[in-house]
Image (cartoon, rainbow, N blue to C red):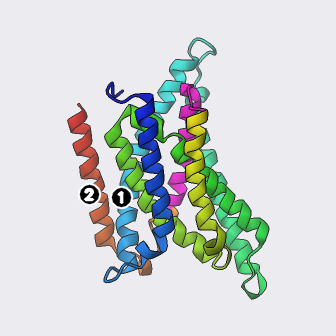
Amino acid sequence: MDAGLTATQSLLGALVVSLLLAALHLAAPRIRRLPFVPEDVTGSFAGGLAVAYVFLHLLPELAEGNEAIGEALRDVVELTPLLDLAIFLVALAGFAAFYGLERLARLHTAHSAGGREPAGVYWLHLGSFMVYNGLITYTMALRLRTGVAFAVLFAIAMGLHFVLTDRSLEEHYPRRFPRSGRVLLTLALLAGWVLDALFAPTSTVVVALLTALLGGSILLNVFKEELPSTGRSSYRWFLAGLALYAALLALVTAVGE
């Protein structure tokens, strides 16, 4: 834990990160269409960053969270092999929930006459991403207190990831999403920070479970958005993003030892 970073400082830092992520959400369409930069380049580079984050940061973080749950519950219940899987079951539930919503959106979009976008499916799909965004900023202050450099790398990965989730939602809902979705997702980021300021997470178990739920969702969205079909991707730029993030993470880890 960083002894030089107080709870107030980490909360203010989380606000800065939340505002930057909100700005990225609003600017996502312009970022995807940067002049002289093909969309497959930005998408693949962001994909490489996010995939490196999943394998080198998220999965180890889930394992650490599982150990934290075991320590917290050791005096309360008898630890069993099934309980050792608890955090991974929560991550799996997050993965399955977002996969189900994605299939529902694709199914209804494909069967909608005249390009009509079903309101119920849209709000359900958008609502799940609002929860997703809220969890990211709700746990951001805690991430900053446990390691500023790792929290910054997490924010970078999520910020670039937002650019591609924005593309996916706009493709599903080309009429509704530009009018309301992008702004609501931005507000969800700020709402997560407000909840953290009012009701900061204190339980190790709760934090670990929230991280696992968010992790399962990130896993699905990373592999769905950041590993697109061959025609929309550049393997060279994917490797560039992956190598850059892996190098940064290795550097941060080495400096922190």
Q: Is residue 182 magenta?
A: no
Q: Is residue 15 left or right of residue 169?
A: left
Q: Residue 199: which quarter of the image? A: top right
> How far is mark 2 from mark 1, CA to CA?
7 Å
The image position of residue 119, as x and y in percent, is 77, 70
**Image point (61%, 57%), residue name:** 129
Q: Is residue 207 magenta?
A: yes
Question: Where does the magenta region start and end?
Answer: 199-223
Q: Is residue 115 left or right of residue 166?
A: right
Tell which residue pokes out farthest to the bottom in this image: 114
**Image point (65%, 69%), residue name:** 180
N-terminal-most mark, 2 or 1: 1
Q: Helix or strand or loop: what does disc 2 sit on?
A: helix
Q: What residue type is disc 1 on? A: Leu
The residue indicated by pointer 2 is 244
Q: Residue 241: which quarter of the image? A: bottom left
Q: Are marks 2 and 1 in contact (CB under 8 Å)?
A: yes
For residue 49, the mark is: 1
Give whichever of 41, 166 is nearer the camera: 166
Give whichever of 196, 147 is nearer the camera: 196
Q: Residue 202: which quarter of the image? A: top right
The image position of residue 39, as x and y in percent, is 40, 78
Residue 122 lies, with reference to residue 114, above or below; the image says: above
Is residue 178 visible to the viewer in this orientation of the structure? yes
Q: Helix or strand or loop: what does disc 1 sit on?
A: helix
